[in-house]
Amino acid sequence: MKRSVERFQPLRIVLFGSHARGEAGKWSDVDLLVVLPEVDDKRKATVEILRVLGDLPVSKDVIVTTPEEIAQRGHLIGSVLRAALREGKVVYERS
């Protein structure tokens, strides 16, 4: 995680899903919402973050977003953003 923070300088990283709820099983993946100040290509940023986290011996799902996207879509019922923001646990926040 430290390498991700150093390289991508996120505003916040939120752990969500089964790990955040304390319901993770042996085969559960780790769900991370990574809030970047700005991003031109979310897919490319996601691939880069996954590459940096690649040596962690667990399956990972990474959602890359921005504060603007959270403001526009974070309230939409049924969206991954809303679920991550409501149930997630902040594991990193830039001070």
Image: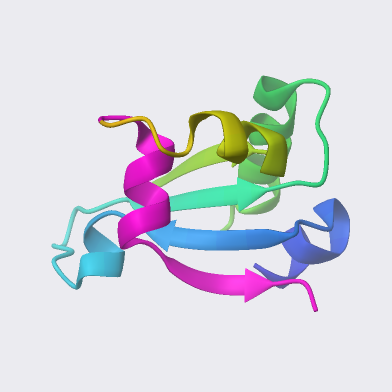
Where residue 88 appears, as percent x and y from the top left, is 38, 62
Residue 62 image position (x, y, % from top left) = 51, 42
Residue 56 visible, this angle: no
What residue is shown at x 43% (from left), y 62% (from top)? 15
Q: In which quadrant of the rendered image does the N terminus lie?
A: bottom right
Which residue: 80% across, 79% down? 95
Which picture quadrant has residue 92? Answer: bottom right
Residue 40 position in % (x across, y down): 83, 22
Q: How is the image coloured?
A: rainbow
28 versus 48 height, above or below: below
Task: Name the outermost residue toward the bottom.
Answer: 95
Is 27 or 68 nearer to us in this picture? 68
Q: Which residue is found at the position 48% from the left and 52% from the top?
A: 32
Q: Considering depth in this image, is 17 or 82 the residue closer to the camera?
A: 82
Q: Quadrant of residue 70?
A: top right
Quick check: is 60 in the magenta stretch?
no
Q: How many marks?
A: 0
The residue closer to the viewer here, 39 or 67, is 67
In front of the other: 56 or 88: 88
Instruction: Find out whether residue 85 is within the magenta segment.
Output: yes
- The image quadrant that residue 20 belongs to is bottom left
Q: Residue at x 42, y 53 (%)?
A: 85
When the figure is inspected, residue 7 is found, relative to residue 50, above or below; the finding is: below
Q: Left or right: where does residue 10 sit relative to residue 33?
A: right
Boundaries of the magenta span: 78-95
Residue 47 in sight from this viewpoint: yes
